[in-house]
């Protein structure tokens, strides 16, 4: 099983959206038995909460399920259990690298770095910008490129 973990700050806006979009593409391509998807936050403020209303609304509009998701904080064991740990912005990556310390950090990457010539490097935080449509478009594009990369790399 290839394990992919999406990470943001609160695990209520961006990373649950990425988890849901990525899982849907994985299912559409018939790889749900090969790829496991999850998400977590670097912060602990929203542990146990469902995704933000803005994330739930846009996912419902796009017919993508995020049923049952509750926010959780990333743990040290996630760093060794997951094959791909995908942060939404430079701050997430900095936090993840600090957590990983001297351990191998080769599997920690920023989502939009998978998108060639992307207009942005970081997925903006809609908790502060309020723009969930922009986040959906960026995350969706990132997820498609990430999956193509994983499929090529893992020879699926
Ligand atoms: P997320 O957004 O990292 O995309 O889930 C945030 C959610 C909550 C907070 C910050 C960002 N907060 O400060 O509580």
Image: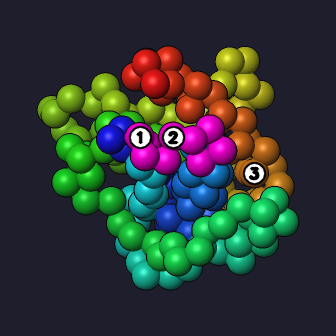
Q: Is residue 9 magenta?
A: no
| Rendered residue at 60%/57% (across/down) | 20
Magenta-drawn segment: 27-35
Distance CA(mark 3)–CA(mark 1): 25 Å
| Rendered residue at 78%/69% (across/down) | 60
Q: Secondary structure at mark 3?
A: helix
Dot in front, 3 or 1: 1
User: Considering only order in the chain, which callout, 2 or 3, is on the residue closer to the N terminus?
Assistant: 2
Q: Which residue is mark 3?
A: 136
Question: In the rendered image, which quarter is residue 16 located in?
Answer: bottom right
Coordinates of residue 12 in the picture (x, y in percent)? 56, 69
Distance CA(mark 3)–CA(mark 2): 22 Å
CB-based contact (under 8 Å), mark 1 and mark 2: yes
Question: In the rendered image, which quarter is residue 82 located in?
Answer: top left
Q: Which residue is mark 1?
A: 34
CB-based contact (under 8 Å), mark 3 and mark 1: no
Dot in front, 3 or 2: 2
């Amino acid at each position: 099983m290839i394990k992919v973990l999406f990470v943001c700050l609160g695990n209520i806006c961006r990373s649950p959206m990425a988890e849901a979009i990525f899982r849907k593409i994985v299912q559409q391509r018939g790889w749900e038995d090969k790829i496991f998807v999850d998400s977590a936050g670097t912060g602990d403020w929203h542990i146990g909460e469902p995704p933000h209303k803005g994330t739930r609304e846009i996912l419902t509009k796009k017919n993508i399920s995020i049923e049952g998701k509750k926010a959780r904080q990333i743990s040290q064991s996630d760093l060794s259990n997951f094959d791909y740990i995908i942060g939404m912005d430079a701050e997430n990556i900095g936090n993840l690298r600090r957590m990983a310390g001297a351990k191998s950090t080769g599997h920690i990457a920023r989502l939009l770095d998978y998108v060639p010539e992307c207009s942005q490097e970081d997925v903006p935080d809609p908790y502060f910008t309020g723009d969930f449509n922009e986040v959906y478009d960026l995350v969706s594009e990132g997820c498609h490129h990430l999956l193509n990369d994983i499929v090529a790399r893992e020879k699926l």
